[in-house]
Amino acid sequence: MQFILLIVCIVAFVDCKMKVLRPPDLVDRLGSKVNIALANFGQIPFGHRLMGYVDMAQPNDGCIPLQSTIGSQFIMIERGNCTFVTKVRNAQNAGYSLAIIGNNNDEPLQSDFVMADDGQGYSVNIPSIFISLRDFNIMKEYAQNYKVLDNSDEKIFILVKFDVEKKDQIDVIFSLDVNDRDSYRVVDEYSQYYNLLQNENINYTLVYSIFNSNTTELDYIIDEDNCICSRRYCSVDPDGEGIASGRNVVEEAIRQTCIFKLFPDKYFQYMNQFNFQCTKAQAYSTCGSKIITNLKLSADEIIKCRDESFKDPLNDQTTKNLSNAYNAILEHQLIVREQAGMVGLPSVVVNSIVYKGQLTGKGVFGEICNSFIIPPLVCKSEVENFYQFEHQSQHYLFLVILLVSILIAIFIIILFFLFKKFVQRDSVEVTQVQVNEMVSQYIKFYEGKDQQKQNSF
């Protein structure tokens, strides 16, 4: 498995669509597909598709506990009067498996719109989607004809797709913050799944929260103690008026990146110990060095990785003059953050698709599994129709073997006919020589007899 720090810096979003399956006249009005946006909380079933009947919330804003569902799986809720999390949590408590939130203004639905977490999103487990006011009102006309208690096949029936981009090679980006404990939680939760996927074709990239104060517009002047390389790489002061500085954070980001690059198997152990043992930024260097020693990592290799990442901008050679240098590791991370438009910490991108919903190690594992064209065996529990993929893989293998066998047979047949042709040609040539020789001897024999007769006279 390769671990690289170079990625494609174009971030897309999950190909999520909603499709109304019935009633037919509603299908005609809405068209084949309805655009949706996702929430930044709840568990998004990446790679899966959900189908179900739809109820209309009573009251429509869903800000108070809702009546329990009888036979429907999805519920429509109007935007406004309370947070998105409150609405979706009420839908979850009523037994629904998906909440559909409708906009309350005529603004077009933007691809980067995200339903925000109010800080209580950890209590929500179901997914939720957001649709435009136009689409919501059209669906609402039909949904209001039926009550929650009605068990009618005439209710709206829809399909929601959470498709992801599938590839043979998976690219995963972790956007982290040295001072953010939630970043360490995600890394720790994912560590077990990293081990499960260790033999798969996955490239991992780390991007840490840093900024260039020379190009970033700030409402305040950043102190140089919070930066390295002449304010080129900075971090927010972790303790305000305390003795720690952003420089400690930036240097630790370089160290953690080097550990991941050199010792990926030990990186997760380092992060776990660092989270609990290194609580003061001013002691990050000393504390981190102790953990490196305890894990029996090569401190010299890590220091070499750090030192060689500082380059002279004139010749791109390693330099010790840090006041006039750029850092190759951090420079690339700045470029990634700028071009990819990554927001929020921590965050994860899989195959150029931003992870949405409640960020957990298991959730990231599920998205990775569903991003494989043919998922590995360890993904069996996360992928719908896994055995279909497995059979498909075996089917492809059979076709490959059959094709190779046919090509070999054709090759052998061609060789046989070529051999036969050459043998026949050689046989004709040899026979012709023998015949010519016999004819020549026969002629000489008769000429000899004629000569003898003439001599006798």
Image (cartoon, rainbow, N blue to C red):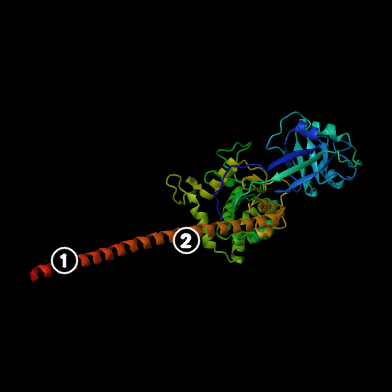
Asked if one can make out residue 224 in the rendered structure from this viewpoint, the answer is: no
Label 1: how many residues lie within 10 Å, few (<14), some (14-19) or many (20+)?
few
Farthest residue to the top: give it.
Answer: 106
Identify residue for label 1. Answer: 447
- Residue 155 screen position, x and y as percent: 85, 39
Q: Residue at x 73, y 38 (%)?
A: 36
Image quadrant assignment for residue 341: top right
- Residue 351 screen position, x and y as percent: 62, 48
Asked if one can make out residue 313 in the rendered structure from this viewpoint, the answer is: yes
Amino acid at dot 1: Glu
Circle 2 or circle 1, nearest the eye: 1
Secondary structure of the residue carrying numbered label 2: helix
Amino acid at dot 2: Ile
Numbered badge on residue 412 = 2
Q: Residue at x 50, y 55 (%)?
A: 307
- Please state, as top left, top right, bottom left or bottom right, where the N terminus lies in the image: bottom right
